Amino acid sequence: MPKSPLEKTVESGISFLSKIFPLQSYLYFPLLNASLFWAIKRTKEWKEKVFSWKVWLDPERVHVKPDDFILCFFKDHPALMRCFEPEVRKKDMASLRKSFVRLYPLLGLEDPFLSALFHQEMESGDYRKIVKEFDQKVRQAEEDINELKNQSQLIRGLKDFAGEMVSLNLELLSQEKVQKVIAEVIKKQIGSKNE
Amino acid sequence: MNKVYPWEKAVGREKRPVAFFVLLLFICFALFSSCASHLREAKLHYTQGQEYSRLYQTEEALGSFKNALQEAERVVSKHPSSQAYMLKGMAELKLKLWQSAEESFRLAHSHGFEKGEEWAQQVSLLGLALSLEELWVEESSLRIYIFLIQKSKLSPVTILAAERYTDAMLRKALRQEGKEREKLLASALKTAQKLSDGDLSCGFYHYLCSQILSHLADYGKSFESALMAKELGLPTEEVYRDNDLQIVYCYQKLKEELASKEWEGFQRKYMEWVKRWKWKGPETPSWQKERQR
């Protein structure tokens, strides 16, 4: 089957990133997804948002949500509820609050970078793994990107990718569908490389 | 042999001093107009930034403030003046460069801007409160935030102080129970309401009110404040989304709480808002992925 323009653009984005981050393929999806999200959303100053490693929303605000808001958040997501049922039933707020701080930016606010970084865990519904590995994985991503010497080359490449994606009139497709295509193409590309 | 300059040939020996004076005047004028143009550019970018801020286009606003700062820096490096330093300080304030802003306001004061000293003190106090908070010195930082909320006329300082004060009060309230907790929440609410009464068009103050009201389980008022915040606009995408989720949360709580007749009336009006906001459903904002509930 011939490749769609969307798939071709994603492939060129991956090919660019594989030159910059040959060993950190886990960064491809978060970087491409965040670039696309901010390119569609806002045209200026987008790179700062792509590199906003901090959890969305002022971290303090996430910490000071009422207990009931946190309980509702867990009850409102069936998969999350299944995973954290014992704590929700016992109203173990200390433990739920700790998990909420990590999960709310992904499942509540839908941060484009973080939700792509934990894409696999979200797909498999392994929310406990996200909570457990959140701090370490976000820190690792931050370090890997900060260590890159040629930051401007990365910005240029991501900007080109985002520009091409925007020119494909992606508004016609839902963000979810585009995300799915990006994830699938990355999976395919990395899979064929590993074989 | 004396060198003869082209302008000497053109004007003749007796008119040379006059021509030299005219040339000097021209150079001065060119220098001055270049400086004035940088100042004008700085003002223009700053005004544009304010306009973007008013429309809550945060990224565009930041871009304009950065441009304003660059232009102001050019002016102060060549022709320092109170106006240029004040403009530099204002741009730095918007970019949250607290220390630089404090220094700029002090320099503006030393060049004759009367309020510069007072503004510099306020920025310095805000920086101190932020540092104290980082070091877990809660009470002193709270006192400074309250002082700034009451006294500061600089809106970026007041807004940040209000935000930090509310978060600190909510943090304190979560550690308490019963009457002590209610007292803290009532105090935080009073401050936030006073701020929103003073500046009704600031969506962010309504957002803070809505957050506090949900701690007090007053979901009707929390909903109204969140609705006001959404309609007036919020500063960032993340706060905007959090406010949407607050609206959904209040809707769910009111569904549990209200008597059937009251609920019907509320739901009818709520659905009109949902239509207006082009949400996917009463519990799904337009930006949110649809999921099974």
Image (spheres, coloured by chain):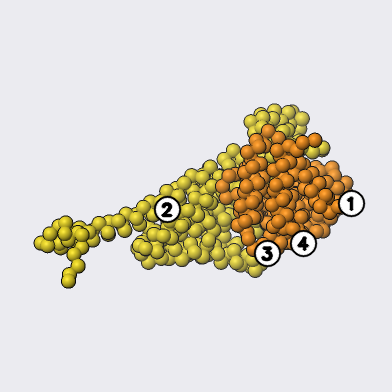
Chain colours: A orange, B yellow
Q: Is residue A140 above or below residue B255?
A: below
In the drawing, what numbered circle is on residue A86? 1
Can you identify the residue that label 3 sits on?
A: A147
Residues at marks 1 and 2, CA–CA distance in whole angstroms: 58 Å
Q: Are marks 4 and 2 in contact (CB under 8 Å)?
A: no
Q: Earlier in the sequence, mark 4 or mark 1?
A: 1
Residues at marks 4 and 2, CA–CA distance in whole angstroms: 43 Å
Give x and y (percent) for residue B8: 17, 61
Q: Earlier in the sequence, mark 1 or mark 3?
A: 1
Can you identify the residue that label 4 sits on?
A: A136
Residues at marks 4 and 3, CA–CA distance in whole angstroms: 16 Å
Q: Secondary structure at mark 2?
A: helix
Residue B133 versus residue A104: which sits nearer the camera? Answer: A104
Give x and y (percent) for residue B213: 67, 46
Q: Quadrant of the C terminus of chain B?
A: top right
Q: Amino acid at mark 1?
A: Pro
Can you identify the residue that label 2 sits on?
A: B42
Q: Nearer the viewer, mark 1 or mark 2?
A: 2
Residue A68 versus residue A40: which sits nearer the camera? Answer: A40
Q: Amino acid at mark 2?
A: Ala
Q: Subunit of mark 4?
A: A
Q: Are marks 4 and 3 in contact (CB under 8 Å)?
A: no
Q: Secondary structure at mark 3?
A: helix
Give x and y (percent) for residue B143: 58, 63
Q: Subunit of mark 2?
A: B
Residue B177 versus residue B263: which sits nearer the camera? Answer: B263
At x 57% / y 57%, what residue is drawn? B161
Q: Are marks 4 and 1 in contact (CB under 8 Å)?
A: no
Q: Nearer the viewer, mark 1 or mark 3?
A: 3
Q: Amino acid at mark 3?
A: Glu
Give x and y (percent) for residue A129: 84, 55
